[in-house]
Amino acid sequence: MPKAYWVSAYRSVSNTDKLAAYAKLAGPAITAAGGRFLARGEPAKVYEAGLMQRTVLIEFDSVAQAIAAHDSPGYKAALDALGDGADREIRIVEGV
């Protein structure tokens, strides 16, 4: 079974306090669900139409595990804390 990768790409952060509250809850919820943080922070370099904004890469053992982490009560609490504090997108991608 291929691994899965959760990619969060931030377009903007409008409230750093909300982002901090989200991070405090999201990290433990994701790792408890089997996620392993591989990279997080601002890009070293961007190309094409890339934005110099926060990016997070998390590895899971499967797509199902990544989806379950996102849909978990612990992560839902993190999303509630974030609210409208950031504009971003999350993609779950199957590894090759």
Image (cartoon, rainbow, N blue to C red):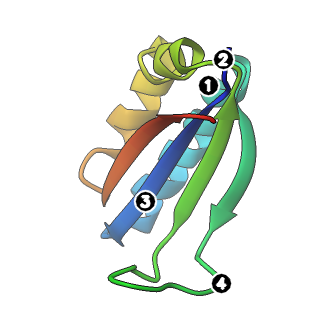
Q: CA distance from mark 4 to mark 3?
A: 14 Å
Q: Which residue is mark 2?
A: 33
Q: CA distance from mark 2 to mark 1?
A: 6 Å
Q: Nearer the viewer, mark 3 or mark 1?
A: 3
Q: Nearer the viewer, mark 2 or mark 3?
A: 3
Q: Does label 3 or label 1 sit earlier along the sequence?
A: 3
From the viewer's perspective, is 87 left or right of 96? Answer: left
Tag 2: amino acid: Ala
Contact between marks 2 and 4 (CB within 8 A): the answer is no
Q: Nearer the viewer, mark 4 or mark 1?
A: 4
Identify the element where label 3 is drawn.
strand
Contact between marks 2 and 1 (CB within 8 A): the answer is yes
Tag 3: amino acid: Ala
Please tell me how crowded label 1 is: few (under 14), some (14-19), or many (20+) other residues with Cα within 10 Å.
Answer: many
Task: Tell me, for residue 16, which label it has, or none.
Answer: none
Q: Where 59 sits versus 83, above or below?
A: above
Q: Nearer the viewer, mark 2 or mark 4?
A: 4
Q: Where 30 sits versus 57, above or below?
A: above
Q: Which residue is mark 3?
A: 9
